[in-house]
Image (spheres, grey):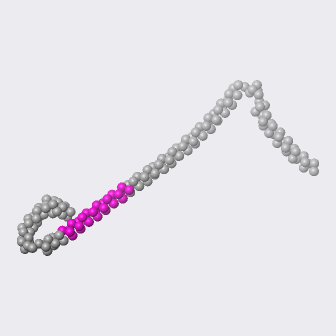
Amino acid sequence: MEAVDDAPSQRATDDSHSSSNEEDKPTEKPDEVMTFAEFMSAQTKKDEASIQAAAELNAKEAELRRKEEKEHNHREHLRQVRKQNKKMMGEHRHHQTVRKTQREHRRSHRSATTSAQPAADVDTMMTSPVTAASEDADVPFSAELQAQIAAFRAAGHHTEEAVRDFEEGL
């Protein structure tokens, strides 16, 4: 039993002994034992090691900064692209809406003018006491109008809308 009791205490003394020896080693070598050249050599090695460690740390930090900046630039680029796409889609939608409303306006105008004009002609013919005279009067004008429309189309304005505008102007 005594051996068991001695073992832990001996380990404790060995541990404390070895740690005290390690602590004493650097302080055991006073300046007088170490020459100045040895001291400078040791100091230079320490300085070189710290410089190397600082350089490695700076390189790692610089690499990390570059990665973060690259990632930030990429996110910013994607944000700008999304913003531009959103803007373009808004313009496209606006353009499509404008085209649609213009198209609807033209169609409604056409339908209003074409449907209102024959009805007005029918009303005037029904209420007019001299229908035969007006029909005779329309015949030369109609031929003249047809000639002007043919000349207008021959001039290169063939769209139905342009012809309609021309006819309305006459």
Task: Say whether residue 46 is magenta.
Answer: no
* Among the 4 quarters of the image, the one containing residue 25: top right
124 or 142: which is nearer to us? 124
Measuring 43% from the left and 53% from the top, which residue is drawn there? 82
Residue 139 visible, this orientation:
no
Residue 102 lies left or right of residue 144; in this view the side is: right
Corner quadrant of residue 136: bottom left
Q: Residue at x 40, y 52 (%)?
A: 84
Rendered residue at 78%/37% (across/down)? 22
Q: Position of residue 78 (x, y in %)?
A: 46, 52
Query: Which residue is nearer to you in this view: 170 or 134?
Result: 134
Q: Residue at x 77, y 31 (%)?
A: 27
Q: Taking 168 as reference, is 77 above or below it?
A: above
x%, y% of residue 62? Answer: 55, 41
Picture mark count: 0
Q: Which residues are magenta?
A: 90-118
Quadrant (top left/top right/bottom left/bottom right) for the C terminus:
bottom left
| Left or right position of 24 against 164 | right
Q: Where's residue 30, x and y in %?
A: 76, 28
Viewer can see residue 97? yes
Say if 46 sits above or below 73 in the image: above
Q: Look at the image and say whether residue 93 sits in the magenta stretch.
A: yes
Q: Height in image: 130 above or below 59?
A: below
Q: Quadrant of residue 34?
A: top right
Task: Indicate left or right for 4 with 89 as reference.
Answer: right
Residue at far right of view: 2
Main SS type for the magenta part? helix
